[in-house]
């Protein structure tokens, strides 16, 4: 856990219960402010860059209101052959997404932005995890959808909720798939707290 005294007051620019739980394991106290920034799904600039820019939009929108706080924004997307799969529009869309992912390897990318507006500091990075799905039948897809609410989840699934029914292997950070890469975020927060602004690029 990152000692609270080494960081400025921290705000998570998300009300996602998954991100709240993951961040709480790293930082004992922080605020929660939903960011209503518009998210892009245009991966023409690159998959990692897309997630970073979405995270940056979320963080900067909240930073305008809280310039003396350290703001954490994050954006997680599922990519199949570099095509983003965002949150499904409805259950039929969720069925379509799970069918596309069936038996294949895809990437889950989370972009992370740390910004402190008044200090003119920002850190931007992305984490990539490769996930392989089990071959899914129509029946196994229905069984999964009956157990998990997927309409608020990129790619129409949650690895932490009955993931054994659909996921065969995960290569990389599991918490990244859940919505916040704890390992790389822990390093970024520690570096932020230990170094002076002059030692880090803006």
Image: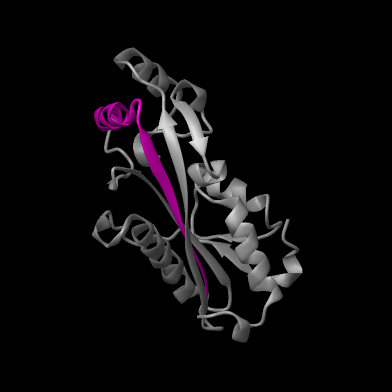
Q: Nearer the viewer, residue 82 or 30?
A: 82
- Where does residue 43 sit, x and y in percent of width and height? 27, 56
| Colour scheme of the rendered structure | one colour
Residue drawn at x 61%, y 53% as measured from the top left: 183
Residue drawn at x 67%, y 78% as measured from the top left: 195
Q: Nearer the viewer, residue 149 or 181?
A: 181
Rendering quarter of residue 47: bottom left
> On the rendered structure, is 125 left or right of 192?
left
> On the rendered structure, is 40 left or right of 29?
left
Q: Taking 5 as reference, is 68 above or below it?
A: below
Q: Is residue 8 visible?
A: no
- Where does residue 188 sit, x and y in percent of width and height? 60, 65
> On the rendered structure, is 34 left or right of 135?
right
The range drawn in magenta is: 91-115
Is residue 94 rendered magenta in the image? yes
Residue drawn at x 42%, y 63% as measured from the top left: 58
- Where does residue 74 sit, x and y in percent of width and height? 47, 57
Rendering quarter of residue 38: bottom left
Residue drawn at x 73%, y 55% as measured from the top left: 1
Rendering quarter of residue 56: bottom left
Is residue 106 rendered magenta in the image? yes
- Where does residue 10 sit, x and y in percent of width and height? 61, 66
> On the rendered structure, is 39 left or right of 12?
left
Q: Taking 46 as reference, is 7 above or below it?
A: below
């Amino acid at each position: 856990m990152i000692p609270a005294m080494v960081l400025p007051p921290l705000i998570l620019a998300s009300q996602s219960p998954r991100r709240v739980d993951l961040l709480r394991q790293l930082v004992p106290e922080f605020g929660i402010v939903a960011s209503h920034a518009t998210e892009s799904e245009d991966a023409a600039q690159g998959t990692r860059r897309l997630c970073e820019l979405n995270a940056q939009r979320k963080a900067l929108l909240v930073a305008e209101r809280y310039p003396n706080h350290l703001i954490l924004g994050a954006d997680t997307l599922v990519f199949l052959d570099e095509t983003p799969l965002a949150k499904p529009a409805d259950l039929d869309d969720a069925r379509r997404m799970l069918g596309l992912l069936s038996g294949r390897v895809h990437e889950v990318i989370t972009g992370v932005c740390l910004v402190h507006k008044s200090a003119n500091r920002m850190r931007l990075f992305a984490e990539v995890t490769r996930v392989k799905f089990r071959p899914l039948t129509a029946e196994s897809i229905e069984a999964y959808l009956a157990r998990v609410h997927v309409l608020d989840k990129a790619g129409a699934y949650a690895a932490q909720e009955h993931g054994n029914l659909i996921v065969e292997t995960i290569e990389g950070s599991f918490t990244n798939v859940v919505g916040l890469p704890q390992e790389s975020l822990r390093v970024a927060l520690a570096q932020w707290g230990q170094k002076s602004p002059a030692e880090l690029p803006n």
